[in-house]
């Protein structure tokens, strides 16, 4: 048994397996030094971190299948994975020194970039040909736990051709039961974050009615600005974009509100609705004191270095704990609805004192199914609130459109646009609740 001495020897083992599978370099797969430009874009600085000009470099990547594959190799079986109590670690040291951790870091970053919704991540490590170990993961979101280990896959044969990959993919994707389990765990996590965020906002003197607007507005500002043709024209804000500048045009709160405006304009939101929403979101930038540098609250001490404005501290908490964890593959509309319900509960009590009582998501989903909502339905809610009923109806309508027309096809996208623009009607008297509902529906 010949022992490996360099990581290149592990790379050579992978290349040998690719040769056996008749996969050709720069045609079927790419090495670290030959990553195609479109993949570099998705790997750029993990998409939403400090060094946006840098891009990740997985040892191997494959892009000819319906979802991309990234592979990270390390010398030594002990370098396969770093975890604590079966929770994979994402600190810098683990990402740099362990195969699985690095591969998952690249994969979740590619999804965070908005260019992919799913990625296959593979970690490979060994000391010799005989001791090579492989772990394969299906990655469905940008959150640090948004993946599942494919326990029955321990070889690279599924990469042989599109047919073998398609069969592998069908067994890899999330089942309905898995999606449900993820939703339940996400709800529990969101409740925990909501409680912490409510405390953080209280410490920074954000009033109860303002808290929900802060959450919804900041979440909008974090999203990439995409025009009505689906073209990305501006990156969403990250905590690093908020530098605590004290000028009236560059204050953190002003930057957030300006980004929200850019987002709404690009989405072609009607001007009257834009004005109403921006009037509510202007609360974020109204108080210049919230943009002054101050000591860090303990809730964000691990997320920011040095002093930061109140607005940046709240923004950073939402960005790291909520925005990066919203995963479209498990139905982000469900998670968003639950999250807003939790924030309302913590921010406004039970809502009864101001006449706001939100219907729980499980009720809105049940009612939408009882009514047999489909892609041709027209749905109206005369007391919209946070749009829980409309969201549940919209999900069923979109699912039906994609089932009959094919997911992400031109016909399906056209029908979904029609559904969103003409088949859902909500009436809400409270301006702040209207803003919340509109944000929730975007």
Image (cartoon, grey):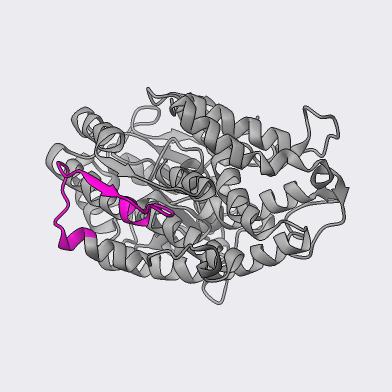
Query: Residue 274 at what x, y percent from top left?
Result: 51, 31
Residue located farthest toward the bottom when viewing the structure as drawn: 85
**Residue 364 is covered by the magenta coloring:** no
Nearer the observer, 146 or 101: 146
Q: Quadrant of the C terminus?
A: top left
Q: Is residue 358 visible?
A: yes
**Residue 376 is covered by the magenta coloring:** yes
Q: Is residue 242 visible?
A: no
Which residue: 42% across, 48% down?
428
Nearer the observer, 146 or 344: 344
Query: Residue 151 at what x, y percent from top left?
Result: 34, 67
* Vertical position of residue 441 compared to residue 262: above or below: below
* Vertical position of residue 289 compared to residue 125: above or below: above
Q: Is residue 342 left or right of residue 218?
A: left
Query: Residue 8 at what x, y percent from top left?
Result: 55, 45
Which residue: 48% across, 62% down?
356
Which residue: 50% across, 35% down?
42
Nearer the observer, 160 or 69: 69
Which quarter of the figure has residue 177? bottom left
Q: Which range is magenta?
A: 368-391
Query: Residue 289 at what x, y percent from top left?
Result: 84, 45
Q: Is residue 408 left or right of residue 84?
A: left
Q: Is residue 354 left or right of residue 14?
A: right
Which residue: 78% across, 30% down?
250
Which quarter of the figure has residue 407? top left
Nearer the observer, 437 or 89: 437
How many labels were placed on the picture?
A: 0
């Amino acid at each position: 048994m010949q022992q490996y001495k360099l990581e290149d020897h592990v790379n050579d083992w992978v290349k040998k397996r690719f040769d056996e599978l008749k996969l050709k370099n720069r045609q079927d797969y790419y090495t670290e030094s030959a990553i195609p430009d479109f993949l570099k874009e998705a790997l750029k600085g993990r998409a939403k971190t400090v060094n946006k000009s840098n891009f990740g470099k997985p040892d191997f990547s494959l892009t000819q299948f319906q979802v991309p594959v990234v592979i990270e190799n390390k010398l030594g079986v002990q370098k396969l994975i770093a975890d604590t109590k079966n929770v994979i670690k994402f600190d810098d040291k683990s990402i740099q020194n362990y195969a699985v951790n690095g591969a998952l870091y690249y994969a979740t970053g590619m999804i965070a970039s908005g260019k992919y919704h799913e990625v296959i991540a593979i970690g490979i490590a060994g000391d010799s040909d005989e001791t090579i170990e492989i772990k394969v993961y299906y990655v469905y979101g940008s959150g640090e736990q948004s993946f599942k280990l494919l326990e029955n896959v321990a070889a690279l044969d599924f990469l042989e051709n599109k047919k073998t990959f398609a069969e592998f993919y069908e067994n890899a994707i999330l089942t309905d039961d898995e999606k449900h389990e993820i939703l339940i765990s996400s709800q529990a996590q969101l409740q925990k974050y909501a409680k912490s965020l409510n405390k953080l906002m209280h410490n920074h003197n954000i009033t109860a009615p303002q808290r929900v607007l802060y959450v919804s507005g900041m979440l909008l500002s974090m999203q990439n600005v995409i025009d009505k043709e689906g073209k990305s024209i501006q990156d969403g804000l990250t905590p690093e974009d908020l530098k605590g500048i004290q000028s009236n045009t560059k204050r953190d709160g002003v930057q957030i509100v300006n980004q929200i405006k850019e987002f709404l304009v690009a989405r072609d939101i009607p001007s009257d609705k834009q004005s109403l929403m921006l009037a509510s979101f202007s609360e974020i930038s109204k108080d210049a004191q919230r943009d002054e540098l101050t000591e860090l609250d303990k809730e964000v001490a691990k997320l920011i270095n040095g002093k930061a404005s109140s607005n940046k501290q709240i923004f950073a908490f939402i960005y790291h704990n909520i925005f990066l964890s919203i995963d479209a593959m498990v139905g982000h509309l469900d998670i968003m609805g639950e999250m807003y319900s939790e924030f309302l509960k913590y921010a406004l009590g039970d809502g009864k004192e101001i006449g706001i009582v939100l219907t729980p998501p499980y009720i809105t989903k049940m009612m939408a199914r009882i009514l047999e909502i489909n892609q041709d339905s027209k749905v109206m809610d005369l007391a919209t609130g946070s749009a829980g009923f409309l969201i549940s109806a919209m999900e069923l309508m979109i699912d039906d459109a994609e089932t009959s027309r094919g997911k992400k096809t031109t016909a399906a996208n056209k029908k979904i646009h029609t559904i969103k623009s003409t088949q859902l009607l909500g009436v809400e008297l409270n301006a702040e609740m209207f803003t919340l509902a509109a944000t929730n529906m975007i």
